[in-house]
């Protein structure tokens, strides 16, 4: 194993959160290239929920933590939920941080569940003081389960607007930073998307943010579809986002930058060029100014941050309504049925969630995913025809996709193996479509097209390793 690289030696200095320079999200499609040229990046980011869902991904994260600093990035903690944060998720995130010796951890200023419903992906909050107070309460609860490392909060892309905003976007995130005591992970791609979709100037919007509280930056590519700009993480970073990054760095100094790429991976040289472009902008940035004396968090002793209860009935009702509109197994609602939200925005958000379900399920089917286009088309049809499972949705969707693919002669061998491995680790689906981790041992064989036989063997416990055995002869 390679010795762990020093971010200081690669970037000319350690960032304000214990990492520096430019990193990338670690994905299986990038692993071979990154490991063959580890100096291409100064740190990597792993999606925490991927480590929770896959023991193999968790072991891989622990291994690469010996090479680079690893930043766990959460997507399902739901720090913006008026109903409160899931403390079990927070404890699992804390355990992962300790296991990886993470220098920093990040999550989103968003909610993924409301009114007892799982939405399945990040949904932006209303820009209100009430929402900022809820985030502060939930951060205070989550931090008790996290190690004593910085927690960075990321701004979210907005696909639907709430009718009761009382703050502008930048002021809302200033309120969040002040009330939580957390610095920001500024997603420049999300700022750009929100500005373009609102018909606003991206440079003016980003200047409204509390840039003195930015400790890390995300950049990513996107695309326009039907007049709406989506931060897809599957396209090259566009020139306007690089220009916005340069403008932010002029104000923040050279904070750590991470390139997000989750799909449609180009030749590694193209990604390396984007990484080097970001590194060049960081090197050209002026030194980070020291914060003025007495500028520490001004609202840490507020009611929200002190751990006292926060009553947010209006936000709870609004989140329950959004969750119902986005997840109900019905056609998109009519204008009257969507009130007080915009029906077109609800329909667009539902379509995005369907796409995210495919994006979440396919990585659980690594052999089937080798048939990229065919697997993606089949997955989209399966997801569209199936209501969202209330728990472990990605696993439930992956099992449905594998079942459908096993009936296709072109896909059947790979689908059968992927399905066997999933069944070794999960039980179900139940009547409501949900699955649960398999705690008991598992041993079963699958006969593949052509007569080959493979066995899957798992020991006791949900995190036990699954071994795939293919007898010879």
Image (cartoon, grey):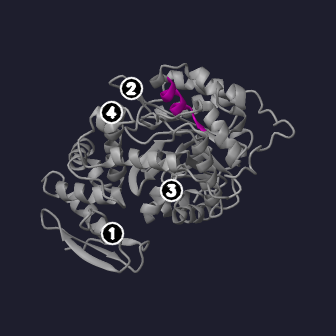
Where does the C terminus fall, quadrant-wise? bottom left
Tell which circle, 3 or 1, labels the residue nearer the N-terminal end.
3
Q: Residue furthest right?
A: 293
Numbered mark located on residue 343 in the image: 4
Residue 432 in percent (x, y) is at 26, 63
Side of 8 relative to 33 (left or right) = right
Side of 307 relative to 266 (left or right) = right
Between circles 1 and 4, the one closer to the viewer is: 4
Residue at the spot of label 3: 83
Q: Secondary structure at mark 2?
A: strand
Residue at the spot of label 2: 228
Q: Report crowding for label 3: few under 14, some 14 to 19, many 20 or more residues within 10 A (C-alpha).
A: many
What residue is rendered at 13% in x and 67% in y?
A: 451
Tell which circle, 2 or 3, labels the residue nearer the N-terminal end.
3
Residue 167 in percent (x, y) is at 60, 32
Tell which circle, 3 or 4, labels the residue nearer the N-terminal end.
3
* Whether label 3 touches label 1, CB < 8 Å: no
Q: Secondary structure at mark 1?
A: strand
State which region is magenta: 186-195
Tell which circle, 1 or 2, labels the residue nearer the N-terminal end.
2
Residue at the spot of label 1: 426
Tell which circle, 1 or 4, labels the residue nearer the N-terminal end.
4
Taking depth in this image into account, of 283 and 222 the one nearest to the observer is 222
Q: Is residue 166 magenta?
A: no
Tell which circle, 4 or 2, labels the residue nearer the N-terminal end.
2
Residue 420 in percent (x, y) is at 26, 67
* Whether label 4 touches label 2, CB < 8 Å: no
Q: Report crowding for label 1: few under 14, some 14 to 19, many 20 or more residues within 10 A (C-alpha).
A: many
Above or below for 278 versus 142:
above
What residue is rendered at 45% in x and 50% in y?
A: 112
Residue 358 in percent (x, y) is at 31, 47
Q: Report crowding for label 2: few under 14, some 14 to 19, many 20 or more residues within 10 A (C-alpha).
A: some
């Amino acid at each position: 194993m390679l010795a762990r690289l020093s971010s200081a030696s690669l970037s000319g200095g350690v960032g304000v959160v214990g990492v520096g320079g430019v990193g990338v999200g670690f994905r299986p499609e990038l692993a071979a290239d990154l490991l063959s040229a580890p100096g291409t990046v100064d740190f990597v980011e792993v999606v925490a929920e991927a480590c929770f869902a896959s023991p193999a991904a968790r072991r891989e994260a622990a291994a690469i933590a010996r090479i680079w600093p690893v930043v766990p990035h959460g997507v399902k903690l739901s720090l913006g939920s008026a109903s409160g944060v899931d403390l079990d998720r927070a404890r699992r995130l804390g355990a992962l941080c300790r296991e990886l010796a993470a220098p920093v951890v990040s999550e989103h200023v968003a909610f993924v569940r409301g009114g007892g419903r799982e939405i399945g992906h990040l949904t932006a909050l209303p820009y209100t003081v009430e929402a900022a107070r809820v985030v502060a309460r939930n951060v205070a609860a989550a931090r008790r389960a996290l190690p004593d490392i910085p927690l960075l909060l990321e701004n979210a892309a907005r696909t639907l607007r709430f009718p009761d905003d009382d703050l502008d976007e930048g002021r809302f995130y200033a309120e969040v930073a002040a009330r939580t005591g957390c610095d920001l992970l500024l997603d420049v791609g999300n700022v750009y998307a929100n500005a373009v979709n609102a018909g606003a100037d991206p440079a003016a919007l980003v200047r409204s943010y509390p840039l003195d509280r930015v400790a890390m930056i995300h950049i990513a590519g996107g695309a326009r579809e039907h007049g709406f700009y989506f931060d897809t993480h599957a396209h090259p970073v566009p020139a306007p986002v690089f220009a916005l990054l340069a403008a932010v760095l002029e104000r923040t100094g050279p904070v750590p930058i991470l390139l997000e790429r989750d799909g449609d991976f180009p030749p590694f040289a193209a990604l390396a060029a984007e990484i080097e472009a970001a590194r060049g902008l960081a090197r050209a940035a002026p030194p980070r100014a020291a914060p003025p004396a007495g500028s520490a968090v001004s609202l840490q002793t507020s009611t929200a941050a002190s751990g006292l209860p926060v009553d947010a009935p209006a936000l709870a009702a609004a989140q329950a309504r959004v969750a119902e509109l986005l997840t109900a197994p019905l056609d998109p609602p009519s204008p009257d049925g969507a009130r007080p939200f915009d029906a077109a925005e609800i329909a667009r958000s539902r379509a995005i969630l369907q796409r995210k379900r495919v994006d979440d399920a396919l990585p659980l089917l690594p052999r089937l995913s080798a048939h990229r286009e065919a697997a993606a088309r089949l997955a989209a049809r399966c997801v569209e025809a199936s209501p969202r499972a209330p728990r472990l949705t990605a696993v439930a969707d992956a099992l449905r996709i594998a079942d459908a693919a096993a009936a296709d002669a072109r896909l059947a061998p790979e689908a059968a193996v992927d399905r066997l491995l999933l069944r070794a680790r999960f039980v179900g689906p139940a009547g409501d479509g949900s699955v649960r981790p398999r705690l008991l041992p598992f041993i079963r064989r699958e006969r593949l097209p052509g007569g080959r036989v493979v066995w899957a063997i798992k020991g006791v416990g949900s995190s036990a390793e699954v071994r795939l055995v293919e007898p010879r002869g």
